[in-house]
Image (spheres, rainbow, N blue to C red):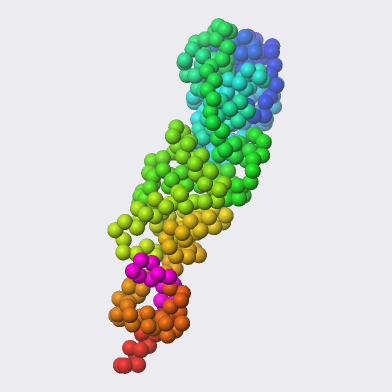
Amino acid sequence: MRVRGEQWVPPVRVANDPAEPVPALLVRFAHVNGWIGLRHFCKLLGSTPEKIGNGSDLATLATATRIPAGELQSKIPVFTGKSVSYFGHRLSAEWLDTRQRRICPGCMAEDGRNHRFWWDLKFIDRCPDHGIALTSRCACGNVLTYTDADNLKCSSCTDEGLLDEPAKVDVPPRPFQAWCLAKMGCAVPVDPVPALDNLPLMLAIQLVTAVATLLDGGFSRTRPALSAMKDGGIHAAERAFELLVQEDLQIAIEPVVEGFRHGRASVFEIAPIEALGWFADEYAFKFAGNVPDFDRLLRHALTHCLGFPVAALDRREHLSLRSLAREVRAPMEAVILALEESETFGQCRPVGDDYAVPTSVATAIRVQWFNARLAHL
């Protein structure tokens, strides 16, 4: 109890687990000292679960646990705009959930109920060590929160018999989640994925999420509402990751390009990336110049789907022969003859009943026709 302004220090100490968030450390601290009500426990310390959990009153917890405040501070999420730094990893803020607590019953049973910070990440739903689903439910069915007084059960349960285990549900392997955990140093290394390995974690997850949305949503000018961070989106993210591992994006973009083709006379008079609809803007905003290995895969897939070589994603490289003929006000046959005479027709690729003319060749034809008109003035 408090005596003359001094802070009460609970008798049982806890070790600092580097992978345990501060709110979970607080819950474990209360539990080992025999307290059922976390709020009452924090009141005796002179604080609240919220103040300690958000980092605004770490001094109280540091004094009570004898853990240096600096070590505790490194485990507090730091938000900057729409991103968050969490345990040294820069992530999108929407991927972090520190309100509803999730646990792996297998892990909890093995190491004294220590929580792992990656259980708070929405794109992780499976324990890589036990192959079971993370659960947000106590054995009694109530939702687990960070105001419970035990990391394995809710605040309504006081019977030790309820600790037998929340339901263990087997989950198939999640290669994308395993890759993310390995990237964070929380799991054993996985096989190389060249398209992702050299990227910052947040950018890599955003890229997988974007490919998952392409895979699941088809062609659209606006991005479909798909999140790879929860529910069915997790499965879409795993499928997208598999394609990146196989270095084959054709399956993801072929339906999108087909949707783009619908109602268009030609598909090669645009920057190739525009055939992917909303992804073109997202690519320009987030990925352009930052994902060279992914660019290589995407150029290869677009070359196959569009039917002409794609050397640059965001630059128009071809013009329709029909459009070129209209520009120079000449029949297509006359333009073809001019291309043959200049020995550049071989660079033009047939696409349906038209030809894709490289922009450099088209420019030369425009100049030739312009000079021919000047000669007749």
Quadrant containing the N terminus is top right
The residue drawn where x is 35% and y is 53% is: 259
Picture quarter containing residue 349?
Answer: bottom left
Residue bounds of the magenta highlight = 349-362
Judge from the rendering whether residue 23 lies leftward or rightward of residue 66; answer left or right.
Answer: left
Q: In the rendered image, is residue 120 in sight?
A: no
In the image, residue 103 sits, relative to residue 278, either above or below, namely above
Residue 129: horizontal and vertical position, in percent? 63, 28
Instruction: Indicate the quadrant where residue 293 lies.
Output: bottom right
Q: Residue at x 35, y 66 (%)?
A: 352
Regarding residue 336, the answer to whether it shows in the image is yes
Q: How many marks?
A: 0
Q: Is residue 57 magenta-colored?
A: no
Q: Residue at x 50, y 33 (%)?
A: 122
Residue 300 in the image: state x and y as whole percent. 51, 58
Which quadrant does the C terminus fall into?
bottom left
- In the depicted structure, whether residue 250 falls above or below residue 113: below
Residue 291 position within the rendered picture, expressed as x and y whole percent measured from the top left: 55, 54
Viewer-side residue, 185 vs 84: 185
Residue 149 x %, y %? 56, 14
* Horizontal relation, residue 162 to residue 348: left or right: right
Residue 359 drawn in magenta: yes
Question: Residue sitting at 50 percent across and 30 percent down?
Answer: 97
